[in-house]
Image (cartoon, rainbow, N blue to C red):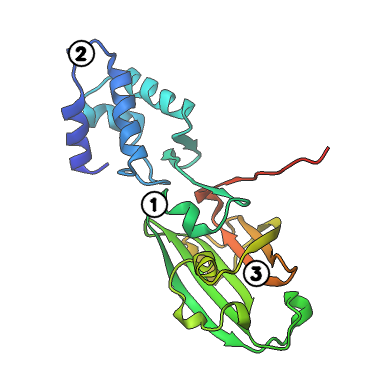
Amino acid sequence: MEQHFIKHIKNKIDVNASTPLYLQLKNILEELIKNKTFKHGSVLPSERKLSEILGLSRVTIVKALAELTELNLVIKKHGKGTVINLPIDYNLSGGGFSSQLKQQGVVSNRWLIRELIANKHPQKLEINCDQRIAKLKRVRLVDGMPVSIETTYIPEQFLPRPDLLEESLYGYWEQQGIDIDVQEYTLAIYRPTIEEATMLKVSPNFPLMKIKLKTYNKSGDVIECGSIICNTDYYHFKFNVKVAL
């Protein structure tokens, strides 16, 4: 824990207040977590160390962390200790990555590929067209942390200049009057390649989530297909499903 955080916490603690010290500490840490002063995945010092550096009893530290655990803002991880838990809420039926996550942090891209290529494998890509297709590949980042690798194939008519795309594909389509109608997803646990693990800053044996998607417009055309490899430590997946009775 950095020195200025320690000073901030100490300045906020009021030993003369009627609020118990453990609740004061819990409230201070909760605020620091929710405003992302403490980043998701960062590790807090041990209970003994926190007790020493904050000048509070071990019991106070334990009770404060227990309160944060109840709120699911911290979790215990074997071999690490107490870890900040503030994953990305991502609704697969809720629209594009950029539009959803811009409310949860600073979203950016590390572009790897933006080009038009020949459609040599129409059956594999499930895009049956004679024209070229746009291939997009990028690492998605939230607050500077790589959270997923996205590879997308799009018929040229729906993205004629992939080299000019900077941010949201769905935002571009909205500007062009291209409506999304149906999306299909499949999810599976996935072991990354060494290159993918390096890009996402995980070990090669770390289990990731691979999402395959296919998007149709209102005419029934496939306008997008591809995959997203997600670091599951950073995602909290949601689904909205209308049940037919």
- Check disc 2 and give the amino acid type: Ala
Point out residue 166 in the picture as x, y percentages from the top left corner: 43, 73
Contact check, label 1 and label 3, Cβ < 8 Å: no
- The CA distance from mark 3 to mark 2 is 56 Å
Q: Nearer the viewer, mark 2 or mark 1?
A: 1
Mark toward the viewer: 3 or 2: 3
Nearer the observer, 141 or 231: 141
Q: Amino acid at mark 3?
A: Gly
At 38% across and 45% down in the image, what residue appears? 42
Q: CA distance from mark 2 to mark 1?
A: 34 Å
Q: Is residue 128 left or right of residue 106?
A: right
Element under disc 3: strand
Q: Residues within 10 Å of mark 2 (few under 14, many from 20)?
A: few
Q: Quadrant of residue 59?
A: top left
The residue that disc 3 covers is 226
Choose top left, top right, bottom left or bottom right for residue 85.
Answer: top left
Does 79 appear above or below 47?
below
CA separation, marks 1 and 3?
24 Å
Image quadrant holding the N terminus, namely: top left
Out of 199 and 53, give the one closest to the viewer.
199
Name the residue located 76 percent from the left edge and 80 percent from the top edge: 128
Residue topped by disc 1: 105
Q: Which residue is mark 2?
A: 17
